Image (cartoon, grey):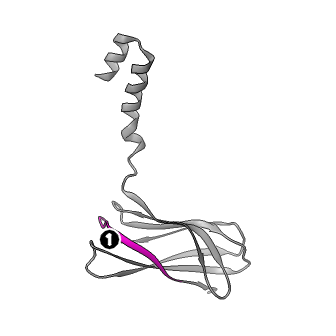
Amino acid sequence: MCFFAALRTGCPVVCFVCALALLWPAAHTDAATETVLLGETFCSDSPRVCLRGSVEYDYDRGTVTLQGRVKQTRARGTLVVVLDIDGRDLKHSKRLKLAAPIRGRSFDLIKASSRFPAGKRFLNWSVRKVYFSDR
């Protein structure tokens, strides 16, 4: 309908508004993903390995993803971030582990995912513990 109105009027403003109306839903299909921890620095104690990144939760797929960049380190192994999750959609608090492989190079990009029940909203997320395993 909007397309035909734009053709009849020949007005560039009407064409722009019609294009915006058509593209708006496509640009906002990711509404089921929430960034639960943004720009956090996750560090283990010994050896000191740090990762600066974010944690996202996809409500529809039930996937929790940790993405970030390794800060200065030479250690090789796995950085594990343990999250505490609670909220009104859960009967009991939950714990979730995200394990990110570290190759011993500074500034490497890291991505680790884990499953969490889909459809849960209104949750509180916090970092419980961060540790490094060289095994």
Q: Which residue is mark 1?
A: 117
- Vertical placement of 30 versus 122: above or below? above
13 left or right of 66? Answer: left
Residue 4 x %, y %: 32, 17
**What is the secondary structure assignment of the residue under circle 1?**
loop
Q: Which residues are magenta?
A: 117-129
x 40%, y 35%: residue: 23
Quadrant showing the C terminus: bottom right
- Vertical placement of 25 versus 124: above or below? above
The front one of 77 and 119 is 119
- Evaluate whether residue 44 shows in this view: yes
Asked where in the image residue 91 lies, by quadrant, the reply is bottom left
1 left or right of 52? Answer: left
89 left or right of 21? Answer: left
Residue 87 x %, y %: 31, 74
- Evaluate whether residue 110 shows in this view: no
Quadrant showing the N terminus: top left
94 left or right of 103? Answer: left
Asked where in the image residue 86 lies, by quadrant, the reply is bottom left
x 59%, y 66%: residue: 68
x 64%, y 81%: residue: 77
102 within the magenta span: no
123 within the magenta span: yes
- Identify which amino acid the numbered label 1 is placed on: Pro
The front one of 104 and 52 is 52
